Image: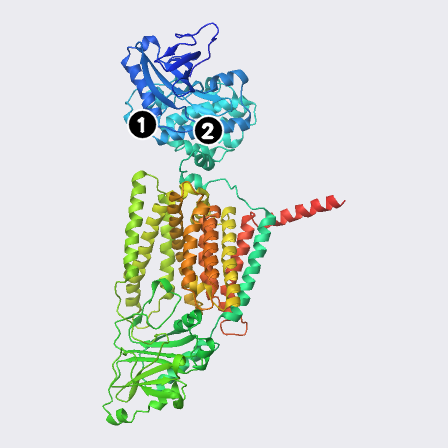
Amino acid sequence: SSDRSDISSFHGRFLPGTILCNRYRIVSLVGRGGMGEVYRADDLKLGQTVALKFLPLEFADNEKRLAYFHSEVRLTRQISHPNVCRVYDIAEIDGQHFLSMEYVDGEDLGVLLRRIGKLPNDKGIEIAQQLCAGLSAAHENGVLHRDLKPANIMIDGQGRVRITDFGLATVAKEQLAGEIVGTPAYMAPEQITQGKTSQQSDLYSLGLILGELFMGKPPEAWISELQSGNSAENVSSLDSLSNAQITPQVRSAILACLHPLPEDRPKSARHLAMLLPGGDPLEAAVAAGRTPLPEMVINAHDQNQIKLPLATVLFLLTIICLLWVGVSNQKLMRVYETPPAILSGRCAELMGELGYVDLPPDSLFGSSENLAMNMDLVSGRRSAEWYHEQRLPPFLFWRVWTDGSFLLEEHHSAYFSSPERPVVQASRESRIAIDDKGNLLGLYVHPVASSSNSDHTENFDWQKVLQLAGIESGRAKEVALQTQPNVFSDQYRAWKIGEGESELIVQAGAVDGTLNYFEIVGLKQAFRNPAAPQIDGYMIVAFLGNCFVWLVAWLNIRLGRTNWKGASRAAAFIFLLYVVQECAALSLSSTSLFRDVFLLLSDRAWGHAVGHAVFVLGAYLAIEPYVRRFWPRALVGLARALEGRFSDQVVGREVLCGVLAASGILAAFRLVEFGFGINPEVILFSISRRPIHQTNLWLASLTQFVSSALLVVFLVAAVCVMIRMLSRRIPFQWFILLPLALLGILASWNRPDGFPAYVPFIAITGVGYILVTMLTRIGLLSGVVMFALVPLLSTALPVNLHSWYAAYAIFGMAIPFLLAAWGYCTSQGGFANILAALDSAQTRGMKTAE
């Protein structure tokens, strides 16, 4: 655009009403300048007002000027942004070249500043943010303006900004070295002296415009004084010249743009927007339909800050739900009351009674859940009374002796101790399982030293075996073996206890008169020899999932929209969690510590930790750009937490909401269980109440819960992204109800007898909808907290202060309470702010009463 002319005295080359190219009808001349004349015209074909820009007549045969003219069309058409003037087409009439462009009903910024002087601070910040957004759109398309000045910035009647006149613009990689173009008063030092242009040279020009915008004076009136002296003098210069209340943040932004060295200026126009106050660059990017930069996300303004009354209500509701979960744990959780030390001694005593006095040096003990009982209770096939009559406990206690070393059995359930851990370089191994009364439940010994005593073989006392198991011999009927034992014995026996559905099978085996095998068929096979590792469906799915994740990540990398910094932090966090989990869950032998530590570091632990870290790195690179595009604010809390900003109010708010979601879901599930006698945690999420009562496994379990929660959140986010892409014309929240409802119907068909069909339907649909809404509206961090606390609360022991597990129970229940309290205080900026707000409210109440 150009300075306005008196259109009543001069109409330019074309009189009003002239029709050009059978399409454009001239309305008036609106401006002229060094790059030509601009007319307002009506596009008769499209029925809209346009601006027609003509080259000066003397430039009609100038190839360089024509090249600039064509470049303006070619480059500007690549930019689609509300703050950049759109160019439609280029044409020619009688040898005169012109282009059609968006008509802006307003005036250029230079005329506006000469007419009214400096702008109000708020309006100046608004225009500055729009200038940053428009220039950023050009730079993101690789276009450098090279002639940014107030005369090339239009302000329409609504105060919106349009950057115009890209006649000297160029693609960054195509610019000619040493070519000096532009308006000297608004050119960067390197542009004037060397012809070097870059994003930073455009930002220098923008800094001059911003100084003129806030002070109402052209650069020559203050630039020389501004650039002399140190930064403190620069700030005072701005204050003295402007005589206006320019905020320190605005001064700092202008000075950053005007640094003599390009590398010391802001990295981009978006970065400059973040340096300026007033607007929210994140919202501006979303409104413009563009994917915000990671820096915009992590530095976004908090628009969803919860006030103290609402935060207090959420906190109190969380406490109520947690208390209800704790009360229900007292009634539902089954834990053996005998201390582990006594049960461990009983295991050694039983082994002595069976003739094993020379056991291997190292041992490991723990408890395992009776999964068969759990599933029977869920399906309604058998009742708890039946298990009580058959003396089958909800948990079995075990102890293993070996001359090898123990390694972690199951990476994804580090807290689930069992004797099925792989044993490294073992030549002798003995396993025994008992109930909390000390009765024998299982035995596996390999090998058994041969006594070569045939009398022991012929006269072996099988009744003593039943007696050690607490089974009355009169109830046992000898039958054939039901399952093939996986340990060698030279003689076997099997008994049936009970009839029909209450039938129970017990099997035993002996070698040379020494019992070396015993099991109750149907009970968890914790004492059987573990099968060799093999490739299963899970491993295949995991491999294919990794391939797909990294394929999408590679595409994002090629498109340049990945967040490597955030992905690296997430991967490092996961790596650390899995290393801690492996180390905490590992049991080392006392005879070969160096060897076992070497195995830990070189084999399973590091490989497992690195494998998950690589997957999380790829998942973050693959999923985060899409979440940042659709729900950028959902990433704010997680990004700041990974950066270590734990005192941030957004982090506190999301933690509080996550604790509330976890406790609320479990509280609702416990109500369902008390009403229908069914555990929804098992049916819907395969979560079983597995108590944790070893210090090292508590640490392993916590890291396991958090790492798994992060992986699950990435998975749910990926599903949300795919659904969001499919639901362009249907509201996302409605569209996602369809697959959730389908899952609820499928779960209803497979329900246990007597279980109402609508319960799983409502549970899956409702919980899924709440979860997705929480992730997309509140933040991914809240989902991580929720998924981490649900299994923790499911495994929290009853708070029985007189039991041997009291310390573990208090610790397990204290974590969510402390997280809720911390999230509540942090969401309000700290406990001191809460007290100040309460004191202020009390003061206002007293004044009102007076």
Mark 2 Cα-neighbour bin, 10 Å: few <14, some 14–19, many ≥20 = many
Residue 110 position within the rendered picture, expressed as x and y whole percent measured from the top left: 47, 18
- Pointer 1 or 2: first along the chain: 2
Spatial separation of the CA atoms under disc 1 and disc 2: 22 Å
Identify the residue under disc 1.
Answer: 172
Single out the mark in the foreground, 1 or 2: 2
Identify the residue under disc 2.
Answer: 130
Compared to residue 166, the image places residue 56 above or below, namely above
Which residue type does callout 2 highlight? Gln
Residue 531 position within the rendered picture, expressed as x and y whole percent measured from the top left: 27, 71
Q: What is the quadrant of residue 239 in the picture?
A: top right
Which secondary structure lies at badge 2? helix
Residue 756: mark:
none
Residue 245 position within the rendered picture, expressed as x and y whole percent measured from the top left: 56, 27
**Residue drawn at 30 percent across, 73 percent down:** 591
**Residue drawn at 44 percent across, 45 percent down:** 732
Which residue type does callout 1 highlight? Ala
Residue 742 versus residue 102: which sits nearer the camera? 742
Does residue 769 show up? yes
